[in-house]
Amino acid sequence: MAGLKAGAPTPQAITVHEASRVLEVGFSDGATFRIPFELMRVYSPSAEVQGHGPGQEVLQTGKREVTLVNLEPVGNYAVKPTFSDGHDSGIFTWDYLYELGEKQDALWTQYTERLAAAGADRDAPMAPQGGAGGHACGSH
């Protein structure tokens, strides 16, 4: 299946915790991760966030209070969240959710370092990305 490594753990349970703003995912290997919505949002695998190649990532800010308004399955290999800020173009494969859960401490550190390097604040509103609509890749 697309998006899955052979023998990779698959989710056995997915729970959206609205009050604490985390997605809890229990995997077939016994691992359980509580992935904050903010982390999912700032590391969305979409082109809108990741760009179209290395060095084109768009630093996300103002996502601390983001919530999930919808979480829909994509085949048997992923989920597609819709966030409260309207972002809905990221497809989170089981492998990617596992990676976010497993590496979240390092990813938080990387995120805060990127914010500091850009002189940005985690709670600052997103800067306009130029042009009407902001993103011109046509993936919306």
Image: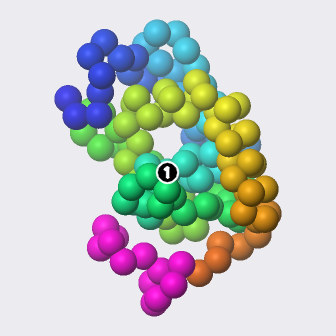
Position of 19 compared to 1: left or right?
Answer: right
Snapshot quadrant of residue 133: bottom left
Q: Secondary structure at mark 1?
A: loop
Q: Is residue 121 above or below residue 7?
A: below
Position of 62 compared to 75: left or right?
Answer: right
Residue 130: in magenta span? yes
Residue 10: in magenta span? no
Residue at x 24%, y 39% (from the top left corner):
75
Q: Which residues are magenta?
A: 129-140
Residue at x 74%, y 48% (from the top left corner):
113
**Looking at the image, can residue 136 be seen?**
yes
- Within 10 Å of disc 1 (Cα), the crowding (few <14, some 14-19, many 20+) is many
Which residue, given by chain and number where applicable, does mark 1 sit on?
A: 44
Relative image position of residue 29 (x, y in whole percent): 46, 9
Give the quarter of the figure containing the N terminus. top left
Relative image position of residue 124 (x, y in whole percent): 76, 69
